Image (tube, helix red, strand yellow):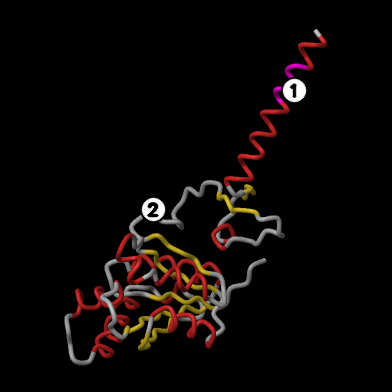
Amino acid sequence: MLQIHSILAPVDLSEHAREVLAVARALAARFKAHLDVLYVLEEPVFPSFYQAGAAALYGKAPDLREQAHAALEQLIEEVSEADVAHGIGYHVRQGQAPEEITAFAEEHDTDLIVIASHGLSGLTHYLLGSVADKVLRRAPCPVFLLKVGGKSVLAPPWPGRRTPADGRPPRQPVAASTRNCRMERIAVGSPEIWQARSTMAASCSSVSGRSMALMS
């Protein structure tokens, strides 16, 4: 059984922060876990969603750290702490978001990170990369990747979930452990493997057909 005692929810103070917080809160309530909400005040290199979200809501104030604390307090006030058995903490750090998020997770023995995917693409993705992608690769714990703006993954009804199998013992997905879901294993291979299998199947079918013709 998957044990989760500490959940980290990095937020960017954009309009999607509430979605991330709602999912993280629901998971924390489900697992009776402590919830940490983290905002990273990034050192500007290129404009990012983290900076754009903060600037849009709170402008260019001299003390951005203070404003970030105020913003997090406002967000957390909207969350009923009664739903989270072991409380909610909020934190502001300065630096590059992927590094600070993974460092926080390591320092606080985080069991699960809930983070939004903003769907960057094209030149923007090339220049900035995706914070979620980098966290996914570097995180010391499982990552719950949430596509913001879509359907809630916590709202019923819950259809069957599919998880890829690579031949190793399957790992219990976090989403399945939050509800009684039916799990179905699927195999994923390279196009070359599937082309070879299709060719072999077609050859076998052809041979079988000729054999039956001879027998009749």
**Looking at the picture, how far across and down is residue 133, in whole percent?**
45, 68
Taken as a whole, is the magenta stretch helix, strand or loop? helix
Q: In the image, what residue occupies the spot 52% across and 71% down?
A: 137
Q: Name the residue under label 2.
A: 151
Q: Residue 141 carries which label?
A: none
Give SS at disc 2. loop
Identify whether 77 is placed above or below 172.
below
Q: What stretch is highlighted in magenta?
A: 205-210
| Image quadrant in which the C terminus is located | top right
Considering only order in the chain, which callout, 1 or 2, is on the residue closer to the N terminus? 2
Q: Nearer the viewer, residue 201 or 138?
A: 201
Identify whether 35 is placed above or below 212.
below
Q: In the image, what residue occupies the spot 28% across and 83% down?
A: 44
Q: In the image, what residue occupies the spot 27% across and 81% down?
A: 71
| Image quadrant in which the N terminus is located | bottom right
Q: Mark 1 points at which residue?
A: 207
